[in-house]
Image (tube, rainbow, N blue to C red):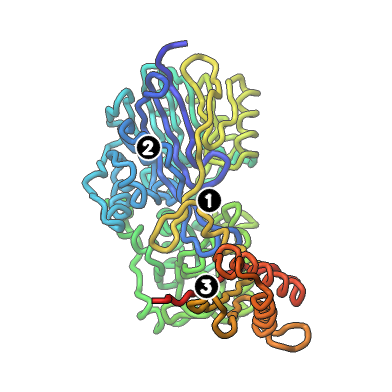
Amino acid sequence: MSAERLIYVPLGGAGEVGMNAYLYGYGPKGRERFILVDLGITFPDMGGQPGVDVILPDLTWLIERRDRLDAIFITHAHEDHVGAVGQMWDKLQAPVYARDFTARIARLKMQDQGQDIAQVKTVGKMEPVEAGPFRVQFFPVAHSLPEASGMIIDTPAGRLVHSGDFKADTTPGVGEPHDPALLAEIGRSGVKAMMCDSTNVMNKHAGRSEATLAGPIADLMRNAPGMVVATTFASNVARLKTLAVAATEAGRSVCLMGRAMLRMTQVATESGILKDFPATVSPEQAKDIPRENLLLIVTGSQGERRAASAQLARGTYMGLHMREGDTFLFSSMTIPGNEREVGRIVNGLSEMGVDVIDNSERLYHVSGHANRPDLEAMQDLIQPAILVPMHGEHRMMREHAKLAIGRGMRSLVVSNGSVLDLTDDVPVLVDEIPTGRTYLDGSRLIGAMDGIVRDRIRMAIGGHVFVTVIMDEADEVLGDPWAEIAGLRPVAKGGQALNEVIEDELSDFLNRASRKVLTDDDKLNDGMRRVVRQVVMEELGKKPEVTIVVSRLSAE
C-alpha cells in the first residue's frame, strides 16, 4: 500500500437524512490534507431534544486539525447542506467555495453570524479549484432548487465523483436540467469511486418531472371553495414558481409568508435564476382580498413550531387565519422523523374544518432525489469502480450498496465517523473517529453529551423540586426548609399540599441529622435529596429532579 492514502470520512449525513458533512483526505497517515464537502444542519425532535433550535455536526475532531483543512465546498443551498456554515466557519476558518446561488445563501448565513462574507468564493460550473492535493469542479445536476451540483474531485490516487443531491429531471422548471451527455463524459474519464445520494433507493418507480405538477395544482386551486394555503420547502424555488403560476391561472392572488421563503425568492431573483415570477401581495394587502381569490405560500412543511404553517394551525399568522372550507396543501414530502410535528399541524387544521391535502395521490409533489431506476442510470453513466452510498438512513445506504454490488461494483456502507481507505482498488474501512451532534440552543452551541438537554428531559418526565435551607453561624438549621415544585401535581394523597409534605419530612430529617451531616454540604445535600425523592415517589409515583441550596450565615 502507498505511503500516502486517500480517505473518505462522513461526519454527518451517513445514516440519516440531514446534517450533511463529508470529509476527503489525501496524504501520509496522520498528516493528510482535507477538504470538507457540505456543512449542514438537521432539525430536532422536540420530544428528544426539547428547546433545541437546530442540530449541527460535531466537528471537534476536524477542528483540532483545521490547519490541514484546505477548503469547504457546498454543493447546494438546502439547509441540510449549507445551514451550519455561519455557525461553524469560525471554528474551521477555511475558504468556502460554491456556485453563485449557493454562495449568495452561504454569505447570508455568514452575515447572520457576523462572519467575513469574503470567505465565500463564487465558482462557475466546471471551473477548477485547486485545494491542497485536490482539484475540484462543480458539475450541474437537477434537484429541487437552482444550481445544485455534483463534484468531480481529482486526487493523486484517482478521480472521485460526489453526486450531491440529484434527480433525473429534464424539465425541472427552475434550475439546470438533468444532462446525461455531461455525466457520460465524466464517466468516460475514468472514475475510481462515486459517493452517491441514497434517499430514494427504495422507490422502484422512475422519478417524475416538476413539469407534471402544474396542471393538477391549477385544477385544485380552481375547484377549492375558500382560501388555499400551500407549504413546501422555502428553498424549492421551482415549486414556489409552479404554485404561483398555477394560482394566477386559477384567478388567485399570491402572498408569500415566512422569512426563509422571502429570502430565497429574493436571492433567486437577484441572481437571475428566477424569472417571470407572478406578482405577489403583502400580508396586509391579502387581508382585503376575497378568500376564494387568495393563495398563501407559507413555510413550515416539516412541522417547525415557529414557522407559518404551525402558527396558522394554532390560530393566526400575521393577521391571517384559516376557517372551515379552506384548503391546506402539503406540496412536499415529510422527512423521516418529522411525522409527529407534521401530524400536529394536520390535526390542528382539521379541527378548524380545513381540508388538508397531501401527496398521497402523487399529484402535488415530486421528489428532488433520484429513485432506484434513476440511480441505476446514474451508475451506468458515471461507471464508477466503487460506489459508496451516502445521504440516507442506514437501511437506505445498505440497500444502495446491495444494488451496486448486484450490478458489478464494489460497495460497502460507511457510517458517520468511519474512515474509508480508497487508495487501492478495494475499499477498506480502516478506522473510526469520534462524531456526534452539536445543538444550537438559543444563541449558543452546546454538546449533545453536555447534559443540558438530558436534564430537560428528566425534568419533563419527573418534574422538579427546589429546596432551600438556611444554616446559622453555629451550623444549626435556621427556621424551616422550604420547597418549590414545578411540573408535579401540587396535592399529595391526603389532600395536603405536596410542598408542605416535603417540608415536613425535610424538617424531621434535619432534626435527626448528626453534626457530621449538618456541617458537610455534600452529605447534607445527598440526604435531603433522598428524602425529597422518597416523598414524591410515595405520594405521586414520580422521581423528580431535585435542587438543594444550603445557605450558611457567616460568623464574621
Q: Residue 91: x and y, percent?
A: 33, 45
Where residue 371 appears, x then y in whole percent? 58, 40
Question: From what the image shows, is residue 545 above or below residue 210?
Answer: below
Q: Which mark is residue 449?
A: 1
Amino acid type at mark 2: Glu
| Left or right: where 541 falls relative to 322 | right
The residue under label 1 is which amino acid type?
A: Met
Sequence-first tag of 2 and 1: 2
Estimate how packed mark 1 is, as few (under 14), some (14 to 19) or many (20 or more) residues with alpha carbons within 10 Å: few
Q: Residue at x 30, y 55 (%)?
A: 108
> Above or below — where is 392 with respect to 254?
above
Q: Nearer the viewer, residue 549 or 416?
A: 549
Residue 550 marker: 3
Q: Please give the residue where the numbered disc 2 appears in the rendered image.
A: 64
Label whose residue precedes the other's in the sequence (3 or 2) = 2
Residue 55 in the figure: left or right of residue 205: left
